[in-house]
Image (tube, helix red, strand yellow):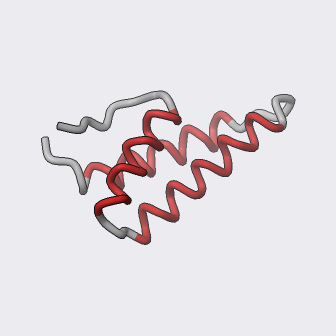
């Protein structure tokens, strides 16, 4: 069983990619793309604070994943 409770962007993206391999969900793809973009920006530009944007994007991806994961 897959759970969606992670504060690690890598883990969250891994779960999202597993789901997207099985089911095409355009909204989830869009949210994952935003999260990846902000996370990559935070790595490339450590002098800028992207933590709020990464956190918001993670919240949106988590919410989208909940509709795909059985509890």
Query: Is the residue 43 above or below the residue 26 in the image?
Result: above
Residue at image position (24%, 55%) is: 68
Q: Residue furthest left?
A: 71
Query: Is the residue 51 above or below the residue 18 in the image?
Result: above
**Would residue 58 be found to the left or right of residue 46 on screen?**
left
Say which of 58 and 13 sits in front: 13
Locate the N terminus and report the quarter of the image it occupies: top left
**Would residue 32 be found to the left or right of residue 6 on screen?**
right
Residue at image position (36%, 69%) is: 24
Residue at image position (70%, 43%) is: 40
Q: Residue furthest front?
A: 21
Query: Is the residue 31 above or below the residue 38 in the image?
Result: below
Where is residue 4 shown, x and y percent of the image?
31, 37
Q: To which quarter of the image does residue 22 belong? A: bottom left
**Would residue 39 be found to the left or right of residue 12 on screen?**
right
Where is residue 53 shown, x and y percent of the image?
63, 44
Say which of 14 and 5 sits in front: 14
Where is residue 12 shown, x and y percent of the image?
43, 39
Locate the C terminus and report the quarter of the image it occupies: top left
Residue at image position (71%, 38%) is: 50
Q: How many labels were placed on the picture?
A: 0
Where is residue 55 shown, x and y percent of the image?
55, 38
**Would residue 57 be found to the left or right of residue 12 on screen?**
right
């Amino acid at each position: 069983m897959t759970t969606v409770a992670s504060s690690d962007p890598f883990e969250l993206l891994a779960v999202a990619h597993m789901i997207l391999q099985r089911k095409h969900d355009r909204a989830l793809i869009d949210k994952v793309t935003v999260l990846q973009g902000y996370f990559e920006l935070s790595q490339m530009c450590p002098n800028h604070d992207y933590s709020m944007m990464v956190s918001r994007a993670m919240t949106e991806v988590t919410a989208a994943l909940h509709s795909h994961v059985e509890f």
